[in-house]
Amino acid sequence: MTYDFSGKNAVVTGASRGIGEAIARTLAEGGARVCLVARSADALEKLAKSLPNDPVVIRADLASSDGWKPTAEAIVEQLGPVDILVNNAGVSNREPAGEVTEDGLDLTLSVNVRNLILLTNALSDSLKSRRGNVVNISSISAFSGSIGQIAYAASKGAVNSMTRNMSIDLGRSGVRVNAIAPGVIDDGMWKTAFDAGLDREKTMSRMAKLIPLEGRWGSAQNIADAVAFLASDKANYVTGQVLRVDGGMIA
């Protein structure tokens, strides 16, 4: 299935690698002018050079308490009105019960919840002006348990709740708000863990046993394709939903 995003302005946070990069490429290839937002300016510049439609690069630290504000201002100034906002930036801090730290909890909630809400809120007038839509990247961790994922799972549960409630607030203005909950994806955060020394083959084999659909991990492109659907006019009567893309793992 192909999607036409010609004439659309799209923002993708956490766009420098993994799922964010795949989403940015998919939207740009569909015709959108994409605003790439992340901490790594070098990675963004490299990605921008490979994309069509004059992409915008904004270096932003969404971990800082007020990082959302200059980011929103730069988006409006450099990109213009927003048709599609993909809130993909996120962190995962592995701290099991008894070892949860204030710093780890604050970082996870700040990036995954607080600044996500504040950035979306700051761009809401722009989204209303274009009858745009928001796609939040959640996680199946919001539906299931995992060792050391207390803060992360709680943050993604909050993203799901935010998605439902913001869809109600913005729906009267024609703005749709949905979320994607990825399952086990062979990219992004898992790649970081593998690069840090986690045994790739053993981990993939163990996790594959939990996935009904052929026991295979998902790809960043699987998530990007789901985002493209929700961001497109083909989903113009879909809002307030959390779509699990997990190979049946939660089923």
Image: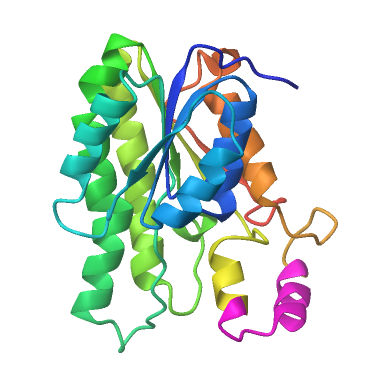
Image label count = 0
Q: Residue at x 47, y 16 (%)?
A: 8
Q: Nearer the viewer, residue 176 or 242?
A: 176
| Position in image of residue 5 (x %, y %) | 56, 17
Query: Relative to 8, does residue 221 appear above or below in the rendering?
Result: below
| Position in image of residue 227 (x %, y %) | 56, 34
| Position in image of residue 228 (x %, y %) | 59, 29
Q: Residue at x 37, y 81 (%)?
A: 95
> Is residue 206 shown in magenta?
yes
Please indicate whether residue 233 sits to the left or right of residue 76 in the image. right
Q: Residue at x 30, y 27 (%)?
A: 78
> Is residue 8 shown in magenta?
no
Query: Relative to 199, does residue 60 appear above or below in the rendering?
Result: above
Q: Is residue 216 visible?
A: yes
Q: Nearer the viewer, residue 179 or 62?
A: 62
Query: Relative to 96, does residue 11 appear above or below in the rendering?
Result: above
Q: Main secondary structure of the magenta part?
A: helix
Q: Is residue 15 visible?
A: no
Image quarter of the N terminus: top right
Please indicate whether residue 79 sits to the left or right of residue 180 in the image. left
Q: Quadrant of residue 208?
A: bottom right
Q: Quadrant of residue 234?
A: top right
In this picture, which residue range is highlighted in magenta?
195-208
| Position in image of residue 88 (x %, y %) | 44, 46
Query: Relative to 150, does residue 164 appear above or below in the rendering?
Result: above
Q: How is the image coloured?
A: rainbow
Q: Residue at x 24, y 26 (%)?
A: 77
Q: Nearer the viewer, residue 151 or 231?
A: 231
Q: Nearer the viewer, residue 122 or 113?
A: 122
